[in-house]
Image (cartoon, helix red, strand yellow):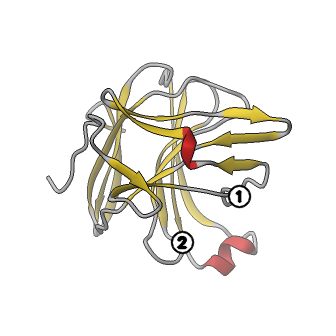
Amino acid sequence: MVFEDNFTGTEKVGPSGPPWFAYSGTPGGNEEGLWKPENLSIGNGQMLLKTTRHGSTWVTAGAGNSIRQTYGRWEVRMRMPYSRDVKFVVQLWPSQGWPPNIDFAERGRPNEYIAFMHWGTPADQKSGHKLQTVDRLAGIDMDQWHVVGVMWRPNSIQYTIDGRVW
């Protein structure tokens, strides 16, 4: 194991970590949203990302981890009550450049869990020629706690939920 965090409240959160850093500003792909570091808290065994609405703007939190690693296994114990307006994503994001990235937990419709692998060049993505794979798993109540994960190897990517590959 390279890293484990049980969010006991001793972790530091700052603009550059370690090990966690809070996003600030407008999320890419959502001009109507806003990240504010003060909406992120750690303690009592959890990382909490608070979301509120101010007029037409959703204000939430985003967090990243300063651990840099290619290939491995990542798992997150989480829950996300369904909302038509607010979605979640847990992803592996490159330390420099984009794409590629792996979204290994994303909320779709009620009781739907989605995973994406994006690749290509930024020009491919902007031109609408998006290179990606999409996997969907129905019947998952993300209002309840689950352990979601991804196993990334040089020649394969497998998504997991509660310890089972899907």
Q: Percent x, y for residue 7?
A: 30, 37
**Which of the 4 quarters of the picture holds residue 154?**
bottom left
Q: CA distance from mark 1 to mark 2?
A: 14 Å
Q: Which residue is mark 2?
A: 99
**Which of the 4 quarters of the picture holds residue 120?**
bottom right
Residue 146, above or below 19: above
Q: Which residue is mark 1?
A: 29
First in sequence: mark 1 vs mark 2: 1
Q: Percent x, y for residue 153?
A: 27, 63
Residue 135, above or below 85: below
Q: Percent x, y for residue 45?
A: 30, 29
Please tell me how crowded label 1 is: few (under 14), some (14-19), or many (20+) other residues with Cα within 10 Å: few
Report the residue at 69% width, 41% height from top. Answer: 59
Nearer to me, 59 or 131: 59
* Three-letter code for the amino acid on which mark 2 is drawn: Pro
Report the residue at 63% width, 34% height from top. Answer: 51
**Which of the 4 quarters of the picture holds residue 39?**
top right
Q: Please, what secondary structure does the residue beneath circle 1 have?
A: loop
* Three-letter code for the amino acid on which mark 1 is drawn: Gly
Nearer to me, 77 or 115: 77
Q: Percent x, y for residue 136?
A: 53, 40
Report the residue at 64% width, 30% height from top. Answer: 109
